[in-house]
Image: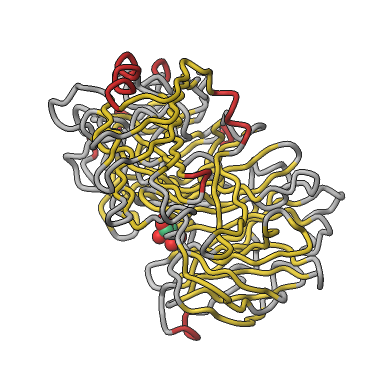
């Protein structure tokens, strides 16, 4: 299967002694063995007429812990020279095939989440470039294709027609001379303001951070084929603001079109908060203003309050999800209230979609779920897509997050009960204790102010304490401050749990961590907890193996 043109020859790549092989590409994938017992070595790919690519990889000289791959279909017929400065014995194990190593069990692996997006191989973190275009939701993401830990940031790429089922495509952006590909966003340049399109095609423009060893700078790349291939703008970087901010940390541009005055807005995290830049053409950017108090992954968008388009507020948040509400005039964000928190736990660096059709009008968000999947050749996942709205609450206007309606098709009712004691509810749930995925919706009422919980194998999914007003350890006060009631919508996947409280007023996510040796399934605990209602749903897998 493997076509090795030259055997191991010493070569000096960047002054480091490296061995190399050359492969004429005849298949879709190159497969690489990885061993975590190895130090990372530097691997360089050189192909005539293509930009060189340099990555760090722990190439296994003997037994592999798992295999990773690079999609080389775009290089068919060309010769790729691969140099490696680590243990060269692994070089001979690299092989090409139309299938990735492990394809047969893909998406059916023991600890593969069944209704959360994960990548086939490697590490993922932040969602990037969330944009809807020509009937497709694009999900780009921070990706290390060569190991299940963070390194070598690329933009991975998946698309979906319904926000439920995803198809993974080849990586979209690769490290280059300016650095690795850090987080950013994407827009559709409908008016061709950047002039990237020559024939009326609407360019999908990605705006991202290139992270070099010394600087982080903002760059632009465009795609004229629905995100399948990108061309990096020759004038990159378009923003280099390190000197202004005396900080290397300047990253994660979030771009959107500001219709009232017709210009692009870019929100950038710099040193201690979010800066706002504007541009007529996505290339020339002018600094406008800065809001302190945020770290990484900025967001800024407008939402109606209680669905009233005549009464809107702007939401600004950072990677942790804490947010401020305020006003925005296209150049300056003026905070009015905050910071508030609507979600916590594993979720981080959540981003919202641009270019959602006006007839839909939803603000749809996906976050990075910081979740491990024990023993798997991949790490991290995306949280369920949610719709964000603003609702007037007893505390003022607040952000609310609920899973998008499209997900409903995954759930089939398995049982519904009312007015149960905790013991009765526990008995109803007994048969589901070993399910690898499940949705449970329940309203519970405490009779004593402390310590009511629903646990799964000893792990508290919902632990509510009205004495301290805490929910799984964080302050939460229901809308009726004297209420001892709480509604929880609980989504359990193989490795994670997401919980939406009281219709999405507060949500949290966590890794599934059963207590060692505890196989007792679900338990309601607490003094005379009343289970007002209880519904159980099965969850269909979102994966349809190729
Ligand atoms: C947030 C973050 C971003 C950065 C990216 C790098 O998780 O640190 O600020 O662009 O991850 O992978």
Residue 21 in percent (x, y) is at: 36, 37
Q: Quadrant of residue 238?
A: bottom right
Residue 316, compared with residue 91, is above or below; it is below
Q: Report the number of numbered marks.
A: 0
Residue 116 in percent (x, y) is at: 46, 33
Residue 23 in percent (x, y) is at: 44, 32
Relative to residue 508, is residue 413 drawn left or right? right
Q: Residue at x 29, y 17 (%)?
A: 427
Observer-nearest residue: 393 or 265? 393
Residue 543, compared with residue 313, is above or below; it is above
Residue 398 in percent (x, y) is at: 55, 60
Residue 207, compared with residue 159, is above or below; it is below
Observer-nearest residue: 123 or 347? 347
**Is residue 10 at all visible to an observer of this figure?**
no
> In the orientation shown, which residue stands out farthest toward the left?
517
Observer-nearest residue: 306 or 184? 306
**Is residue 216 at all visible to an observer of this figure?**
yes
Q: Quadrant of residue 271?
A: bottom left
Quadrant of the rendered image holding ligand 1: bottom left
Q: Residue at x 47, y 72 (%)?
A: 250
Observer-nearest residue: 422 or 83? 422
Relative to residue 201, is residue 321 drawn left or right? left
Q: How is the image coloured?
A: secondary structure
Q: Residue at x 45, y 71 (%)?
A: 294
Instruction: Locate the N terminus and report the quarter of the image it occupies.
Output: top left
């Amino acid at each position: 299967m493997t076509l090795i043109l030259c055997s191991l020859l010493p070569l000096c790549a960047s002054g480091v002694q490296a061995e190399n092989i050359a492969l004429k590409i005849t298949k879709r994938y190159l497969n690489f063995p990885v061993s975590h017992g190895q130090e990372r070595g530097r691997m360089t790919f050189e192909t005539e007429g293509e930009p060189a690519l340099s990555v760090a990889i722990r190439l296994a000289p003997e037994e592999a812990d798992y295999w990773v791959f690079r999609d080389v279909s775009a290089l068919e017929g060309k010769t790729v020279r691969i140099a490696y400065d680590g243990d060269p014995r692994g070089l001979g194990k690299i092989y090409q095939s139309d299938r990735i190593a492990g394809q047969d069990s893909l998406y059916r692996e023991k600890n593969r989440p069944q209704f959360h997006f994960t990548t086939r191989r490697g590490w993922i973190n932040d969602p990037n470039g969330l944009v809807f275009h020509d009937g497709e939701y694009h999900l780009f993401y921070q990706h290390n294709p060569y190991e299940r830990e963070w390194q070598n940031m690329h933009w991975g790429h998946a698309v979906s027609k319904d926000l439920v089922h995803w198809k993974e495509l080849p990586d979209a952006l690769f490290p280059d001379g300016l650095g690795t590909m850090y987080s950013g966003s994407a827009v559709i340049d409908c008016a061709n303001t950047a002039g990237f399109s020559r024939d009326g095609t609407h360019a999908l423009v990605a705006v991202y951070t290139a992270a070099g060893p010394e600087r982080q700078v903002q760059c632009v790349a465009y795609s004229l084929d629905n995100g399948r291939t990108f061309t990096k703008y020759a004038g990159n970087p378009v923003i280099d603001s390190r000197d202004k901010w005396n900080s290397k940390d300047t990253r994660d541009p979030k771009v959107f079109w500001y219709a009232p005055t017709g210009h692009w807005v870019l929100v950038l995290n710099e040193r201690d908060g979010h800066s706002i830049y504007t541009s007529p053409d996505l290339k020339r950017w002018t600094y406008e203003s800065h809001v302190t108090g945020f770290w990484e992954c900025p967001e800024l968008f407008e939402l109606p309050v209680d669905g009233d388009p005549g009464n809107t507020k702007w939401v600004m948040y950072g990677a942790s999800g804490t947010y401020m509400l305020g006003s925005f005039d296209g150049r300056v964000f003026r905070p009015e209230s905050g910071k508030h928190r609507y979600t916590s736990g594993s979720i981080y660096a959540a981003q919202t979609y641009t270019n959602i059709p006006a007839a839909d009008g939803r603000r749809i968000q996906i976050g990075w779920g910081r979740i491990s999947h024990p023993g798997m050749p991949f790490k991290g996942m995306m949280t369920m897509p949610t719709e964000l709205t603003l609702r007037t609450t007893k505390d003022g206007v607040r952000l609310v997050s609920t899973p998008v309606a499209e997900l409903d098709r995954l759930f089939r009712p398995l049982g519904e009960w009312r007015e149960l004691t905790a013991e009765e509810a526990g008995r109803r749930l007994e048969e589901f204790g070993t399910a690898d995925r499940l949705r449970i919706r329940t309203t519970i009422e405490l009779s004593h102010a402390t310590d009511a919980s629903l646990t799964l194998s000893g792990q508290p999914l919902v632990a509510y304490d009205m004495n301290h007003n805490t929910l799984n350890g964080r302050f939460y006060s229901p809308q009726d401050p004297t209420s001892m009631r709480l509604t929880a919508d609980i989504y359990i996947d193989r490795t994670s749990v997401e919980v939406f409280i009281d219709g999405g007023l507060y949500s949290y996510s966590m890794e599934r961590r059963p207590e060692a040796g505890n196989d007792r399934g679900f338990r309601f605990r607490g003094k005379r907890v009343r289970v007002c209602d209880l519904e159980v749903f099965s969850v269909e897998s979102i994966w349809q193996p190729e």
